[in-house]
Amino acid sequence: MIDPMIAPSAQERGFAISRLISHWTEIVGNTAEWCRPADIHFPRGSRNNGTLKLQIASGRGPQAQALTAQIIDQVNAAFGYQAVSRITLVQSLVPAQAPASSVSEPAKRKPSAISDVANIWALDEKLKDIKSPELRAALRRLGGPVTDDDN
């Protein structure tokens, strides 16, 4: 019942973002450890010069900004045309584990946060065959970790 209502939206933008998500590690290499695509928007009636929204780990903003041109080039090379011309960054991923020398009380809880990131990536892998981007996003939210911020 819902699929006919969201099918036009999924057909418009679903292929691009699903392709990016499923091939992200091959496209950007090690950068995929702390950044991933969240969404892609194209100008109305166009499939070129889109804006790619990336989720990045907290503290990686300067590095992500420095790599913006390289990420755009890698994404465009993967598509075979200039699909993306801009990137917007959202710091929403869990940061990488702190070095052992600076372990403090809050840092002792990091392994569970890191396992949550691994679980999210495993969940994304399981959901990659869901055709509807809206349904895939809803299932991902339901299967994602519950944090103190969610209360």
Image (cartoon, helix red, strand yellow):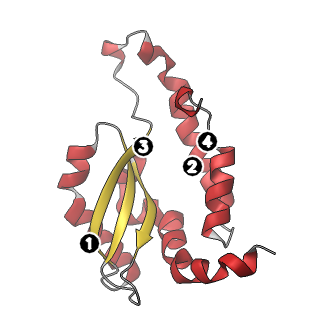
User: Which residue is found at the position 55% from the left and 26% from the top?
Assistant: 148
Q: Nearer the viewer, mark 4 or mark 3?
A: 3
Q: CA distance from mark 2 to mark 4?
A: 5 Å
Q: Is residue 14 left or right of residue 37?
A: right
Q: Earlier in the sequence, mark 2 or mark 1?
A: 1
- Give the residue number, with chain letter if any, for mark 2: 121
* Residue type pointed to by label 1: Asp
The quadrant of the rendering that contains the N terminus is bottom right
Which label sits on residue 73? 1
Tags 2 and 1 touching, CB below 8 Å: no
Pick the front one: 139 or 95: 139
Q: Identify which residue is drawn at 51% across, 72% down.
A: 19
Q: Which residue is mark 4?
A: 119
Say how many tags the image has. Answer: 4
Residue 139, position as x, y percentages in the image: 69, 54
Q: Residue furthest bottom?
A: 45
Q: Is residue 100 left or right of residue 68?
A: right
Separation (CA) of disc 2 from disc 3: 14 Å
Q: Which residue is label 3 attached to?
A: 92
Q: Earlier in the sequence, mark 4 or mark 3?
A: 3
Q: Which is nearer the N-term, disc 1 or disc 4?
A: 1
Identified at 60% across, 29% down, the residue is 151
Q: Are marks 2 and 4 in contact (CB under 8 Å)?
A: yes
Which element is circle 2 on?
helix
**Between marks 3 and 1, how big is the CA–CA gap?**
23 Å
Who is closer to the viewer here, 136 or 122?
A: 136
